Image (cartoon, rainbow, N blue to C red):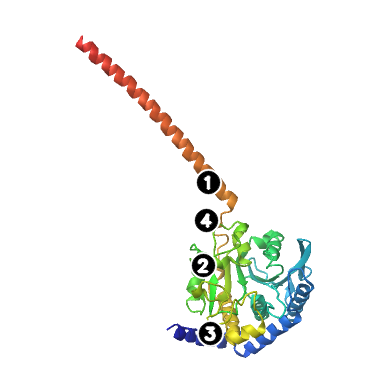
Amino acid sequence: MRKVLACFLIAFSFILAFSANFSLTNLSFCEEELNEFVENSANRTAGSEGEKESANFIQTKLEEINIQPLYESYQQTFDYNDSTSQNVLGLIDNAAEKYVVIGAHYDNVHRLGESDGVNDNASGVITSLNLASYFSNSALDFNIIFAYFGAEEVGLVGSQYFLNNLDENILDNIILYINLDSIGAGDYLYYYTYDAPTIYGNFIDDFAENQAITKLGNKRLYSNRTTFGINYNHIGLNSDNAVFIKRGINSINFFAGNLDVARLGFHETEGHDKIMHVSDSLQTNEEIFGEKFYINMASVNNFVTELLLSENFVESMPLREINPMLLSDWFLKIIAIIFVAVLALGTFLFFKFKGKKVQLQAVVNKEVKAVQNSKKK
C-alpha cells in the first residue's frame, strides 16, 4: 500500500511540475544549476573562503535575473566567534507595504569526498533562485526579500543577524517567512508552521490539501533550538525558521526526509546511512533518490509559487498572531513567579481568616456556655 501511495505522490508531482513554472523541462536546468553551485565551492563551511565564493555565486545569479539588492550591497557581512560570514539579500520591490521573506542557508557541513552539502542546502538555494527568477517579472501585492543566510550550521547566526539589523518598518510588516532547507533527499516532503492552530496556518493547511507535501503536526521529536527561547521541542524547528518564530513572525519550513522511521535524512534502502552531513554528495543523492531528488525541489517550488499567487493570500496572513508557545523564557518565569506569589498569598489569607474564624467561634462558644451556665443558676 505504501509503495502504491509513493508512486501516486511521484506521479502527482510530475503533474504539478508540468502545470507550474518549475516544469519537468526545467528539472535538467535545476540539476545543472545545482551542480554548478556545488562545483563552484563544495566546502562552504561557515567563515571559510568557500562560503565567501558561494556568496559571490549567489550574488551573480541575482544580478543576472535583475533582482536588486536589499541594501546598497547584496552582501551583509557580520562577525562571530573570531570569524566573518555574510548574508546575501535581494529584493523584489512592488512598492507595497507588506513583505514576504524567502530564506535558505548556503553554508554547509563539509567532509572531504563525502559531504558537499548537496541536499543541505544547495537544494534550498537553487529552488530559491528559481523562485526569484519567476517572481522577478510578477506584480504582487507585497514585496519579496530573498535571503541567503551564512553561518546557519554554527547556530543560525546569519538569520539572527539579519533580523537584528532589519529596518523596523520591514520587520513589522513581514506577513510570512518561507524557509527552504534540505528539500531534495527524502522519500517524503514535509512542511511545518506551528503546533497550535493559527489563522495563517489554517489557510496554508487548506491550500496544502491539493499538494503532495505532508503537514508536520504534533510530532515533537527534537530540536536544538530551545536556547533561542522557544519553549518546546520539534523537528520542524531545526532551521532558520526558529529565529523568525521566536520573533512572532508567521513561518513555514519545508524539508524532505522519512519520518516513518523517526529520523531526518534517512532512506529505506539498506546500506545507506544518514544523508545529511555524512554522505551529502551528488553521487550518493543521485544513487539513492535519482530524479526524485529534483522532483522534490520542483514540488516545493510549485507549492510556494501557487501559495503566493493564491486568492486572499495577504488577507490570510495576519501579523504577529498571539501564540502561547512563543512566550519567551523570562516571560514564563514572571508568570510562574506571579502564580506562586498569588498561591502563597491565597494560602496565607486562607489560614489567617481560618484562624480568625476559629478564634471567633471560640469566643461565641464561650459566650454561649456562659449564658447556659447563668440560666442553670
Is there a contact, CB below 8 Å, between mark 2 and mark 3?
no
- Of residues 2 and 55, the one drawn nearer to the viewer in this rendering: 2
User: Of the residues shown, which amino acid type is indicated by label 1?
Assistant: Ala
Residue sitting at x 68%, y 68%: 153
- Whichever of callouts 2 and 1 sits on the residue coming sooner in the sequence is 2
Q: Residue furthest left?
A: 376
Distance between mark 2 and mark 1 Cα atoms: 29 Å
Q: Amino acid at mark 3?
A: Ser
Q: Nearer the viewer, mark 2 or mark 4?
A: 4
Q: Quadrant of residue 369?
A: top left
Q: CA distance from mark 2 to mark 3?
A: 23 Å
Q: Provide the residue designation for mark 2.
A: 201
Quadrant location of residue 23? Answer: bottom right
Circles 2 and 4, Cβ within 8 Å, touching? The answer is: no
Mark 4 burial class by Cα count in 10 Å: few <14, some 14-19, many 20+: few
- On screen, residue 90 versus residue 9, left or right, reads right
Query: How many tags in the picture?
Result: 4
**Mark nearer the N terminus (3 vs 1):** 3
